[in-house]
Image: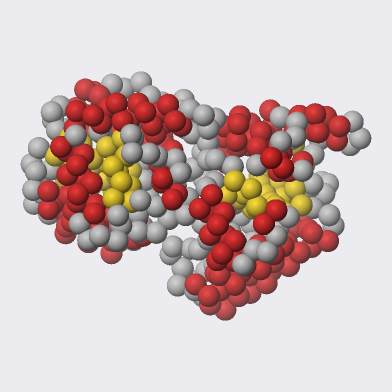
Amino acid sequence: MDKLEVNPIKQLAQNQSKTNKPKLVLLSRWKFNPYQKLLVEHLAKMGVEIEELNCPTIFLPRLLKHKKPNFVHFHSLHSFFLTSSRLKSLVKLVVFLGQVFALRLIGTKIIWTVHDLKSHSSQYLKIDRFGTTLFMMLTHKIITHYEVAKREVITTLGLKNEDKIFVIPHGNYIDYYENKIDRIEARRALSIPSSSLMFLFLGRIEGYKGVVEMIDAFKQLNNKEAQLVIAGKIETKELENLLKQKIAGEDNIQLISGFVPDKQIQVYMNACDVVEFPYLDILTSGAVLLAMSFGRACIAPRMSCFTEVLDESGAFFYNPDIADGLLQAMDCAIQRQSEVLNMGEHNRQIVEQWSWNYVANKTLQVYQQ
């Protein structure tokens, strides 16, 4: 990271003495994820003029309507070119890459923060990989949140110029969501007994996140004093029906289907003891930063994207290649119930270092390098 150690504010002031504020365009804003909102707010405080466009297929005319942007920053790529049709996906890919190439020709710098290297829902994986690789070749700078993600980009996409990829931590969510409700009130809202150990899965429910496997492991515990709450919007009706079948007759498992409003997050987080991440495949997880921001212990597979932010003092890790690994981790959490609050506080202390001011500062250094 030594190559980034410049004063971005000084560099920005030098640029502004010659021109207007540097203009940044962010594409693919996530409607329900505060990640980009927080990044934008803190970059704006540092003097960057920012425009946000919500994933239009033809974005180039709007980008050039007022003045040429200095930087265009991409996050999720798949919505630009993957559809339910192979032919349409190929056509949209050509249109997308053509616009990115045109931006390069006029001198705009292309920045990409890699949250995922592949779509978890598309069936056209070859088109996905081909398009992602070509896009990577057109970028000027690439940002990942973990060292393991950096290595994955280099290995999977065949990145030759490793000097253009940087690791910047994912920012925390401390003080972003309301956090006024106490444990007693939160548990009363969810009908959770005060003495029970409550496991929580919170967020969008998709096949690759291992929720089915988590339910199976929890049922094997055969512990009526433990509680499992699963809350979030379910990807497909088929998956929802399967989950309902899995929990039928289980009084200590709650499935709360649907989008979780921001104000309700504090209820789930403050009611639970341990947040579970039974993912089968993951490159980057903002959800673990959310759990840590609320001071909660975690259960996670021993994958680098988790071990880079969590440690043994705040998490119950398990080997995802062992059939009963998740079961063992959940059982361990029950045996160590008296320790989970301290483990959560440990996580909160760790995540405090990744403020959005810090993240925006490092991001600005990438822009200004």
Left or right of residue 223, residue 244 in this image:
right
Residue for point 50% across, 53% down: 148
Q: Is residue 339 above or below residue 84?
A: above
Residue farthest to the right?
Answer: 18
Query: Camera-side residue: 332 or 9?
Result: 332
x and y percentages locating residue 305 in the rendered image: 45, 49
x and y percentages locating residue 311 in the rendered image: 38, 39
Residue farthest to the bottom?
Answer: 87
x and y percentages locating residue 254 in the rendered image: 19, 44
| Image quadrant where residue 150 sits | bottom right
Left or right of residue 37, residue 180 in this image:
left
Query: Residue 178: in sight, yes or no?
Result: yes
Query: Camera-side residue: 256 or 142?
Result: 142
Residue for point 65% across, 52% down: 165
Q: Is residue 59 above or below residue 156?
A: above
Residue for point 89% across, 31% down: 17
